[in-house]
Every structure is written in C-alpha cells, then in structure tokens.
Image (cartoon, helix red, strand yellow):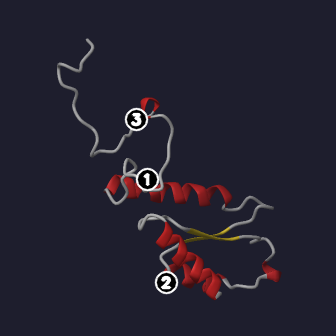
Amino acid sequence: MSQTAMSETYDARMLASQNIVIILCGNKKDLDADREVTFLEASRFAQENELMFLETSALTGENVEEAFVQCARKILNKIESGELDPERMGSGIQYGDAALRQLRSPRRAQAPNAQECGC
C-alpha cells in the first residue's frame, strides 16, 4: 500500500478521537481484471493499521450497504462497551436533539423511581 494511505490513516487518528472507526473500502470489485492492489495486500494493510476492510462494487451493489452496517455496528459496540462516550465533546459522534433521542445503552438504563412515574 502507498505511503500516502499510511499517512492519511495516521492523520485521521491524530486529528479525531483515539477510538475512531475507519473502514477501508476497496471499490470497483467488479473490475477484477483491472485490479492494482490484491485482496491480500489490502487486507494485510487494514489489519496492520487496525482498519475494517471490505471490497465493494457500486455497479453490482455488492457490500455497499454492508460497509455502512458493519461500521455502524462497530461504533455501537464501542459505545456499549464504554470505549466511546457519545456525550463527550470530541467523541466524533453527533446526533439530533437530546429531547428526541433515547439511548438504549445498558449502562444508562435505570429503573424509574416513584417520583418520576406519571401514573
């Protein structure tokens, strides 16, 4: 893999949260004959740099949605394990109005007390 790719991975980690989730998508999987990087090279690079890796094809749709699903799942797992705190400034996680969302994280779940109950 190129020195540029390694440098950009390093830059992303230094400028963002330490727990950033980065996914390396090898695109144009459907053009195997024109491949410039082998699956093994890209996979090895991703593993050495702690990146997620998928090969995708916009033409066929292969793994396009899966890339987003896997990335979102990894972020959610980091939130649930406490590795990422979405409430912390600089976490890199943004979501809508606090009044409209409910976090379903086990560490946030609390039994309602009698004073909070509207019944």
Residue matched to label 2: 48
Q: Position of residue 70 (x, y in %)?
A: 53, 59
Q: Residue 4 is drawn in which quadrant?
A: bottom right
Q: Secondary structure at mark 1?
A: helix
Q: Is residue 83 above or below residue 5?
A: above
Q: Nearer the viewer, residue 55 or 11?
A: 11
Of labels 3 and 1, earlier in sequence is 1
Q: Secondary structure at mark 2?
A: helix
Q: Position of residue 77 (x, y in %)?
A: 40, 56
- Dot 2 surroundings within 10 Å: few (below 14), some, or many (20 or more)? few
Q: Mark 1 to mark 2: distance in Å? A: 23 Å
**Is the C terminus in the top left, top right, bottom left or bottom right quadrant?**
top left
Residue matched to label 3: 102
Of labels 1 and 2, earlier in sequence is 2
Q: Nearer the viewer, residue 8 or 39?
A: 8
- The residue at 50%/80% (across/down) is 49
Horizontal side, residue 81 vs residue 4: left or right: left
Q: Give the residue type at disc 1.
A: Leu
- Dot 1 surroundings within 10 Å: few (below 14), some, or many (20 or more)? some
- The residue at 43%/34% (across/down) is 98
Of labels 3 and 2, earlier in sequence is 2
Q: Secondary structure at mark 3?
A: loop
Q: Give the residue type at disc 2.
A: Glu
Horizontal side, residue 78 vs residue 7: left or right: left
**Is the N terminus in the top left, top right, bottom left or bottom right quadrant?**
bottom right
